[in-house]
Image (spheres, rainbow, N blue to C red):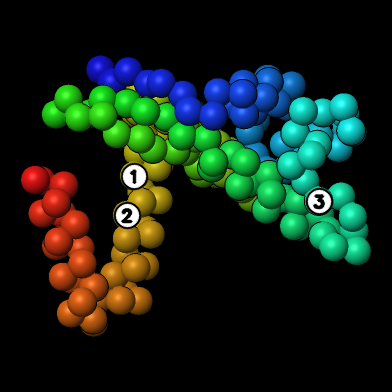
Amino acid sequence: MASYQSLHDELFRQLEEIRERQGELTPEAVLADVEKTGRKHPLYSKFEWDNKIAGRLHRLGEAHRLIVKVKVRFTDANDEERSTRRYVAVTRPTAHQPDYERVEDVVLDPLKRRIVLQEAERRWKTLRSQYGHLAEFANMILSDLHDEAG
């Protein structure tokens, strides 16, 4: 089993506290938590609050970037150290947005893992339909796979 070591520990801790208070981790949940607490919130300074410069959609983008910024180190099946995003977007059928789950929780949950892999397949097929006609695209993919197999 992979062992996970969090990068951006303080941000990770703050996001986990938001998940506990809000019941989910989404950009909306992060922004709502920060707005509710105001200037005393540890993440308050990470947002642009001047509405002349940025509105709510911009702040939701800032919240999203905070979530995907957190990385985790792990040792893969070949005993190589790697890093990836700490949170994985898991699509929920009843919601208009994904919930962000800890990658180690997704890996251990067959349903969440299947949902994430289905989304990865959908994204791959979209990329293939957009760029598959370019020989360079195929070469790039093959080269990357070759490097991974190393």
**Residue at x 18% of width, y 79% of height:** 135
Quadrant containing the C terminus in the rendered view: top left
| Between 3 and 10, the one nearer to me in the picture | 10
In the image: residue 133, left or right of residue 84: left
**Residue at x 31% of width, y 64% of height:** 125
Distance in Å between CA atoms under marks 3 and 1: 34 Å
| Between 57 and 51, the one nearer to me in the picture | 51
Quadrant containing the N terminus in the rendered view: top left
Which tag is nearer the camera, tag 3 or tag 1?
3
Task: State whether residue 15 appears in this view.
Answer: yes
| Residue type beneath disc 2 | Glu
Callouts 1 and 2 close, C-beta under 8 Å:
yes
Callout 2: SS: helix
Which residue is tagged 1?
117
Callouts 3 and 1 close, C-beta under 8 Å:
no
In the image: residue 105, left or right of residue 78: right
Does label 3 or label 1 sit earlier along the sequence?
A: 3
Q: Against 10, is 82 above or below?
A: below
Which residue is tagged 3?
48
Q: Against 36, is 127 above or below?
A: below
**Residue at x 28% of width, y 21% of height:** 2
| Residue type beneath disc 1 | Leu
| Between 39 and 57, the one nearer to me in the picture | 39
The 10 Å Cα crowd at callout 1, few under 14, some 14 to 19, many 20 or more, is few
Callouts 3 and 2 close, C-beta under 8 Å:
no
Q: Against 43, is 3 above or below?
A: above
Which residue is tagged 2?
121
Q: Position of residue 98 (x, y in %)?
A: 57, 44
